[in-house]
Image (tube, rainbow, N blue to C red):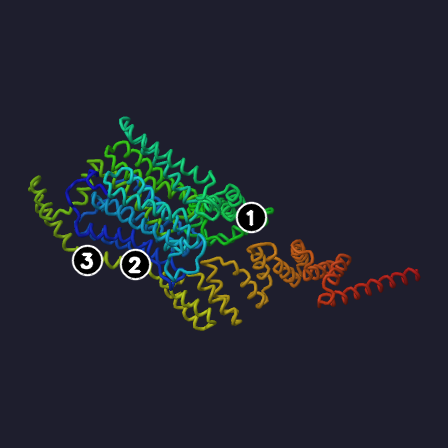
């Protein structure tokens, strides 16, 4: 990094506390993308979320301790403060109207960690050395992951990852190829921008190696959203570079134009001209295949993402203003997918799946926080770019311009990728996103001498003696008052320190508990695989002590108890599970237990829900038949007729449905229709029990008809 090219105050005003805050931020950048824990469900995300949340809490603690040490509580004023505070407010307030309070509560720490990290950075990072160190670490970790991704693609990896294949084996340490690609597009624009503005040849070479490593790894992920995000980001940065240069900088503009033209020419050559580089099986041919127009049209017209986008719009319509609550998308997804599939031919046209994310952050924000929450996020982004554009016009230092352009390019890549993925829900990308927002503000403030002085005055760790002497020089009459005031603050400092440390421990335990529960979940699942049911239940109960809102655990215990035919206790666990998750098999489990209890009305309700949750019409078949039988027992013959007819629409040769439909017809005195259905049963399955019953019923119906006819004939003769 070219440290001398940034015009901050040259005075070193980093205290012990600001140094610890800086270490916390660097630890976030390094540890969050790296950490994982194999004895947890799942291996990657919970450990990363825990690390991110803990380090933000620790950074917050050091910031609070620093303010107490200085005896001064002061926040740097920035254009993003109000929108970010509003975003925090809507996230917290959504707990009030959430579909599931505890689901939203568990999602809240991740959504608060990012904004809090922003405030930590803006109020504590203020020197050129700090900024350069942080950016260097970001690029170093990104480059290292780039190299690792290339090695993974070529089959060079740790033994414990064996089992992954195809593009899925390129996942870094994120567990998913898409998550890895999302991470890579954030440091890449920063590296590219710094490469163009850095004058040191050694540093340019190091940056080039990092760029090639990250680009290579990104390419072999074959992830289209990140491709597009990076592409738009590069175009955006080129425009900023050209517009931010003075009219005299024609040589630089020519270089940018030539580089752009060369890049376009290379891309056209590689993808449009048949060569050995793009023959079948090569990376370029796979990229072409993944990005083909036909595949994109199919996926975004009727594929899985199209399905998710469609039913997410239904969620938004039902909770338009403030949403259904933070984190509730996954809680509502099955119900709204079923609602969407019930419309017209949607179940046939669109793809079924289980989605806990909308694969579009803007839609998911709209569903969970309403148009108000989405509007606040857009306000935040507009404020950010407005600030960045203004600073680029005012800043004359070319290197500093390059840093801001790189940071803005990183945000652009993030925002474009958010159209297709969910980077706001992934710890590593969340950390980098809010870090970049904060650093952009800090770098911009460093170029404004008045703001730089304000930061300096806010952060300079004056001793009490210096403060008193300064004030005495201006007004000797106030010396005694200040001494008394500072004496009182000093007297309570130990209590403040203890209070902050205890609060930190309390918050840390809150975020640690769900992670520990997931570890117990892992060991309980291992016991289930061994069919050690009692030990599994015992382990799961331990998990619930750490996280009593983990719906999956309640469901698994319920399934074990259901297998043991302990239906009453199983029902209690299923009811608890229903508060926190919506499992696709949960309605069927409820229906079975209600059936055992003879609560047929509730059985019918759950069977209808179960039918709507099925992946395709074929899987609905037995449940339609069972629903028809339940309606027969309830003596609701018309709904029974409809249920059996729905089954026959799916499979016209389904014997059980024909037999049940005959029963529904008989109860409605539709004997002709009943005889027709019974005859169908005999034709389709002549040796079945249903066929035997059908024959007996037909004989009885025929005999009764004959007897009635004879009786009628005798009556006519007598008359």
The N terminus - image quarter: top left
Q: Residues within 10 Å of mark 3 (few under 14, many from 20)?
A: few
**Residue count near mark 1 (Cα–Cα under 10 Å), binned few <14, some 14–19, many ≥20:** many
| Residue 508 - label | 2
Residue 515, given in percent of the width and then of the height, sits at: 36, 61
Q: CA distance from mark 3 to mark 2?
A: 20 Å
User: In the image, residue 141 lies at what x, y percent?
Assistant: 30, 50
Return the x and y of residue 198 as percentages of the image width and height.
Answer: 25, 39
Of the numbered discs 2 and 1, the one sitting upstream in the chain is 1
Q: Which residue is mark 1?
A: 350
What residue is rendered at 17% in x and 50% in y? Answer: 15
Secondary structure under badge 1? loop
Q: Cα distance, mark 1 to mark 3?
A: 61 Å
Disc 3 vs disc 2: which is toward the camera? 2
Which x, y percent locates residue 72? 18, 47
Q: Nearer the viewer, residue 319 or 592?
A: 592
Q: Residue furthest front?
A: 276
Instruction: Identify the residue position indicated by label 3 in the image.
Output: 495
Of residue 155 and residue 181, the one placed in the foreground of this image is: 155
Name the N-terminal-most of marks 3 and 2. 3
């Amino acid at each position: 990094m070219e440290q001398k090219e940034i015009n901050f105050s040259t005075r070193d005003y980093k205290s012990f506390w600001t140094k610890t805050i800086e270490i916390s931020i660097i630890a976030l950048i390094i540890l969050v993308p790296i950490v994982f824990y194999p004895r947890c469900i799942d291996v990657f995300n919970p450990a990363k979320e825990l690390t991110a949340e803990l380090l933000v809490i620790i950074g917050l603690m050091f910031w609070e301790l620093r303010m107490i040490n200085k005896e001064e509580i002061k926040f740097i004023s920035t254009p993003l403060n109000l929108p970010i505070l509003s975003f925090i407010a809507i996230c917290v307030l959504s707990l009030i109207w959430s579909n599931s309070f505890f689901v939203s509560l568990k999602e809240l720490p991740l959504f608060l960690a990012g904004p809090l990290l922003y405030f930590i950075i803006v109020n504590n990072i203020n020197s050129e050395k700090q900024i350069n160190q942080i950016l260097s670490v970001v690029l170093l970790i990104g480059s290292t992951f780039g190299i690792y991704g290339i090695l993974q693609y070529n089959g060079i990896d740790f033994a414990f990852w064996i089992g992954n294949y195809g593009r899925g084996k390129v996942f870094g340490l994120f567990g998913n190829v898409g998550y890895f690609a999302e991470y890579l597009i954030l440091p890449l624009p920063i590296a590219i921008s710094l490469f163009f503005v850095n004058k040191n040849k050694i540093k340019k070479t190091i940056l080039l190696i990092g760029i090639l490593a990250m680009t290579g790894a990104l390419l072999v992920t074959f992830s289209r959203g990140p491709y597009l995000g990076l592409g738009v980001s590069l175009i955006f940065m080129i425009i900023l570079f050209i517009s931010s240069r003075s009219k005299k900088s024609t040589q630089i503009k020519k270089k940018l134009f030539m580089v752009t033209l060369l890049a376009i020419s290379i891309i056209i050559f590689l993808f449009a001209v048949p060569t050995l580089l793009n023959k079948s099986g090569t990376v370029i041919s796979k990229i072409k295949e993944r990005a083909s127009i036909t595949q994109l049209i199919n996926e975004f017209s009727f594929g899985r993402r199209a399905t998710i986008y469609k039913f997410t719009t239904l969620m938004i319509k039902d909770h338009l203003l403030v949403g259904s609550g933070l984190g509730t998308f996954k809680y509502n997804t099955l119900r709204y997918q079923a609602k969407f599939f019930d419309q017209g031919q949607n179940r046939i046209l669109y793809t079924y799946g289980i989605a806990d994310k909308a694969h579009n952050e803007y839609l998911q924000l709209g569903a969970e926080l309403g148009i108000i929450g989405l509007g606040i996020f857009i306000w935040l982004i507009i404020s950010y770019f407005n600030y960045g554009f203004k600073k680029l016009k005012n800043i004359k230092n070319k290197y500093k311009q390059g840093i801001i352009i790189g940071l803005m390019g990183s945000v652009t890549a993030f925002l474009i990728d958010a159209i297709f993925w969910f980077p706001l829900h992934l710890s590593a990308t969340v950390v980098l996103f809010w870090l970049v927002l904060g650093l952009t503000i800090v770098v911009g403030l460093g170029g404004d001498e008045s703001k730089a002085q304000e930061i300096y005055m806010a952060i300079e760790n004056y001793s009490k003696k210096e403060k008193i002497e300064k004030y005495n020089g201006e007004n000797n009459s106030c010396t005694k008052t200040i001494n008394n005031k500072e004496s009182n603050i000093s007297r309570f400092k130990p209590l403040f320190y203890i209070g902050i440390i205890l609060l930190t421990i309390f918050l840390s335990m809150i975020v640690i508990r769900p992670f520990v529960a997931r570890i117990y979940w892992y060991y309980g699942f291992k016991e289930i695989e061994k069919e050690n049911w009692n030990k599994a239940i015992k382990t799961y109960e331990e998990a619930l002590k750490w996280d009593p809102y983990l719906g999956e655990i309640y469901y698994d215990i319920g399934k074990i108890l259901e297998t043991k035919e302990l239906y009453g206790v199983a029902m209690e666990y299923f009811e608890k599970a229903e508060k926190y998750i919506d499992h696709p098999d949960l309605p069927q489990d409820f229906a079975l237990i209600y059936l055992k209890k003879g609560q047929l009305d509730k059985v019918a309700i759950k069977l209808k829900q179960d039918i709507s949750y099925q992946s395709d019409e074929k899987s609905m078949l037995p449940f339609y038949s069972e629903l028809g039988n339940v309606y027969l027992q309830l003596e609701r013959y018309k709904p029974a007729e409809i249920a059996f007819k729905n089954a026959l629409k799916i499979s016209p040769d389904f014997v059980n449905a024909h037999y049940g439909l005959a029963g529904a017809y008989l109860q409605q005195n539709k004997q002709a229709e009943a005889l027709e259905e019974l005859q169908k049963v005999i034709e389709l399955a002549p040796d079945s029990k249903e066929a035997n019953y059908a024959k007996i019923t037909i004989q009885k119906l025929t005999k009764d008809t004959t007897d009635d006819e004879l009786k009628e004939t005798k009556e006519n003769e007598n008359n």
